[in-house]
Amino acid sequence: MSLRGKTVFITGASRGIGLAIGLRAARDGANVAIAAKTAEPNPKLPGTVYSAAKEIDEAGGKGLPLVCDIRFEEQVADAVQKTVETFGGIDILVNNASAISLTGTEHTPMKRYDLMHSINTRGTFVVSQACIPHLRKAAANGGNAHVLNLSPPLNMETRWFAPHVAYTMAKFGMSMCVLGMAGEFKKDGIAFNALWPRTTIATAAIKNLLGGDAAMKGSRSPAIMGDAAYAIFNRSSREHTGNFYIDDEVLAAEGKTDLSEYAMVPGAPLLPDFFI
């Protein structure tokens, strides 16, 4: 199968994993709507919606830059409408945008708590809600309609909550959207799945918040998530829904077990990610 001519709407796609997923789709000739907040360059956060759109174009796709803060439903509605007006519909949604704070209960300001929950859980719900009518239409026309949330398996163990309960709740909220919406929209032929990495992924969050250059050396490239997402998009949306996928397991099922190309530093010990 191919994503040529299909339209992929990705939140937080100006950099990192979101951009990697968009670039993989672009290699097929897909249309990629980049919904993110970053309009102006930031020295600590490389990439804007405009630079990402340019990369999508250069990779063989058609990029649509959309300055959008998913905390505000009117901005989401405008971005979705612009995408449909430009490309004629939406075939795939990737809920990638996320906020993180690995802090304990007493050291998590409520402003930060609200940010994580409004972007991770609420934002995922809002964007899904706005895209579902267009995904339903794509499925009804014989398409392969997918929603993919970048969120972890629902593992209700104390060890995943105790160190950073606010963040875990916000990320698990995204995963609960997968669990519920997969059942709710199965009859419509829309797949809802989650994807999470086995190891840390070399993103700005890892470098700036979770260990700096040392953590980057023990990480894999975002390209592994792009390739895993691509494999999921090419599975039947009517047969593959409600799953909590891990990147290396997805690729192994496709016959790819040598993952050395994704290592940021060949041979370096890999760091396991949270929730795995």
Image (spheres, helix red, strand yellow):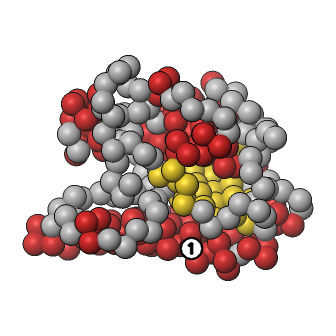
Asked which quadrant contains residue 89, the reply is bottom right
Extreme-left residue of the structure: 106
Point 79% across, 73% down: residue: 188
Q: Quadrant of the N terminus?
A: top right
Point 43% across, 72% down: residue: 173
User: What secondary structure is marked by label 1?
Assistant: helix
Point 87% across, 67% down: residue: 140
Is residue 93 in view? Answer: yes
Front position in the image: 276 or 129: 276
Point 72% across, 39% down: residue: 30
Amino acid type of the residue that numbered disc 1 sits on in the rendered structure: Leu
Disc 1 residue crowd, few under 14, some 14–19, many 20+, Cα 10 Å: some
Q: Which residue is mark 1?
A: 179
Q: Is residue 272 left or right of residue 23?
A: left
Depicted 5 relative to depicted 115: above or below: above
Depicted 233 relative to depicted 117: above or below: above
Is residue 48 in view? Answer: no
